[in-house]
Structure formats: C-alpha cells, structure tokens
Image (cartoon, rainbow, N blue to C red):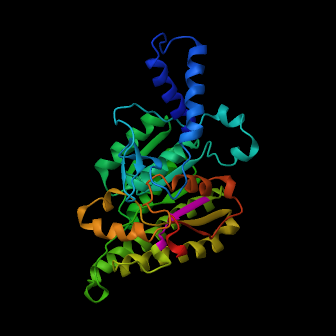
Amino acid sequence: MMNSLITRRVAAIALKSMPSASIHGSNTQFNTALKHVQHKAAFTTVPRIANPNIKITSFEDGKRVDEVVQTDGTTAPAIPADVPYVATGLHPSTRDNMPNTLKNFTLTGKTAVVSGGARGLGLNMAQAIAEAGAENIALFDVNEEAGVKAAQDLQDQTGVQVIFVKVDLRNDEDIAAAVAKVTEHFGDINVLVNSAGIAESNIPAEKYDGQAFRKTMDVNLIGAFVLNQAVARKMIESRSGGSIVNIASMSGSIVNYPQPQCAYNASKAGVIMLSKCLAAEWAQHNIRVNTISPGYMDTALNRVPALDAQKKVWIEQTPQKRLGAVSDLNGLAVFLASDASSYMTGADNIIDGGYTVW
C-alpha cells in the first residue's frame, strides 16, 4: 500500500511538471504519468541488496525520512524533505477485496500497544501497524513530550485512533495502570509490541557499576516481563488471545565486537529466553509470543561522532555492508502481529543484514 501511495504521489508530481497538464486534468494524462513512473520504477527501485544506493524509507518523530545507503554503509537524504507525504491506515473495504493470503497480513479492527513508541524503532513499527489496518494504537514511553507529539502525528497521518500513556517500565504500578487505561479506552488488547529498552556499551565488565547493571535488567528484562504479564492477563481474562512481539537483539545470541556491553547482552538474552517460556505457557490461551532481534541499526542513538570508528567495524562485518534502517523491522513486526504467523510462537527472528552468519 505504501508503495502505491508513493508511486501515485510521484506520478502527481510528474503530471504537475507536464506543460499541458494540471493535477485536475484528464484521467488519461494522470494514467500516462503514472504508467511512466511505474515503468521507470520497475528498473530503478530494486537494486541488489548488498550494493550501495539502496533507498530506505522510515519515520522519525512522526516525519517521513527517505534516504539512500552510501558506499560506506551510512545513509544520506534521498529526496527533498519538503515533498509532502501522508500514509493512511488500511480501509476495511480495501481488505475485503484482497486475496485471502494478503488478508492474513492485515490487522483490521485490532488494538495494539507499542512500548518505546515515542520515537525510533517503536514509532516506526506503530506506523506500520497503523498502515496494516489496526483500529486503535496505544503508545507507551517514559518520554511524555515526545510521546504526546508522536501519538498526535500518527493519528493525523493515518486516521487511526492513537493515545499516549507515560510509562516507566521500572514501575510495576505504572505498567498495570497503563494497561488498564488502554482496555478502558479501547477494550480488548490484541497486539503488544514491546520495543522499550536502554543500552550502555564500551564499559568493561570489571568496571561495570552494579546499580547501572541492575537498571539495564530492570528496564530491558524485568520491565518486559511485567508488561507482557499485564497484557497477557487481559488477553486471558477476555479469552481473546493475541500476539506479543518482544524486541530483543542479536546481542542476546552473540558477544559484540569491538565494544564490551555485558549488561545489555545479558538482558537481551534474557528477553529471548523469557519469550520462549511465555510462548510455551500461554499457548493454551491462544497467545503467541515471539521476538525480533535486530542487528546494528542506523538510529539516532548511533548517529554520534563517538561511534564513527565502531560503525565502520560493524558495517565491514555485516555482509550487506550497511546498518539497518529504522523501517527494516516493520514488515516482520506486522507479520508477527498478524494472523499470517498464527502457527508461529517462541521464535527468535534475527534481522541483522547477515551479521551473525559469519
């Protein structure tokens, strides 16, 4: 759907540039422009995966970001930032006309909770969930200012009902109250995407402060458990079942190089095993629990000069020779949230550009 929207947007721009045409001109003119763009796109928008100049699309702070992968694996703007773009949620009538296989990938009528949803990976996955047809979305985050703005922007962009709830995953009462607020506002929760987390790296284990280690565990692992538990209790109570997607990391399965980060790695290894345990226990309630384990991602947290040298190493050690875009998790998140993955639970899904195969 997004590709269709983008193609029609580009066609409209092309039509505007035609001397004898206007945006309100004949259908023949518009279709001519559209066919030209589609024909050209067929030859220009599917580069080989491992090559540079790959176009990637993501959303940062509610705004569309189009970039291309450079030869060094980093990204740069692909089109002018002032080109307008609006993505809408999947209309039920559109879903009704889809083949059955594609219908299974939609989230029509679903209510989803996305933690860590104020920005970055969480907000991008919330955007994808909205585009897949979700009816309601609740964003959880500790950053209230960013969260309120993200919720409003997402609702304005997609037409989906979106609320924001401030939540500190180190506070069990916060989590319980937030989940209760969602059910009071929207009813049953069908999907949880737990993307909230913190990371510290470049700290040798012998120098790691115990309190800092506990904080990482409190947010990434214990907070994940309490949130999973709170949502699952509602799913069990309503007998509705549902899908839980926990964002772990490839670092839960490997030891990273060159940076030492034992606390983060241990916490994400815990998330992977926790999810397998919950999947086994809650399958009887028709609740599926899976994990997504990203590799090195081109997020705002990694776009700092202090990490430039390390990023060169990461990119060199990744077969695709690039960092992951913040939108690279979207397709898998929608798949795991939807009925297309109905026989899939307890699985850890690594998206790392091939990093862990070497």
Residue 3 lies in the magenta-colored region: no
State the image quarter where residue 285 is shown: bottom right
Instruction: Specify whether 53 is left or right of 48.
Output: left
Residue 235 image-quadrant placement: bottom right
Q: Residue at x 29, y 77 (%)?
A: 202
Task: Give percent across and percent down for residue 356.
Answer: 52, 74
Horizontal and vertical percent for residue 159? 49, 34
Vertical placement of residue 331 versus 154, above or below: below
Residue 125: percent from left, percent from top: 49, 52
Frontmost residue, 296 versus 191: 296
Residues in magenta?
Answer: 243-250
Residue 191 visible? The answer is no
Q: Which of 355 and 141 is in front in this view?
A: 355
Q: Residue furthest right?
A: 100
Q: Where is residue 147 in the image (x, y as percent from the top left)?
A: 35, 49
Instruction: Give the overall secondary structure of the magenta segment.
Output: strand
Q: Is residue 316 visible?
A: yes
Report the residue that reaches farthest toward the bottom: 206
- Report if residue 248 lies within the magenta region: yes
**Across the whole image, how many numbered discs are drawn on residues?**
0
Residue at 52% x, 52% y: name it: 330
Q: Residue shown at 65%/55% (left/top)?
A: 240
Above or below, comparing residue 112 to residue 45 in the picture: below
Up-down relation of residue 107 to residue 350 (above or below): above
Where does the N terminus fall, quadrant-wise? Answer: top right
Relative depth, front residue between 284 and 262 = 262
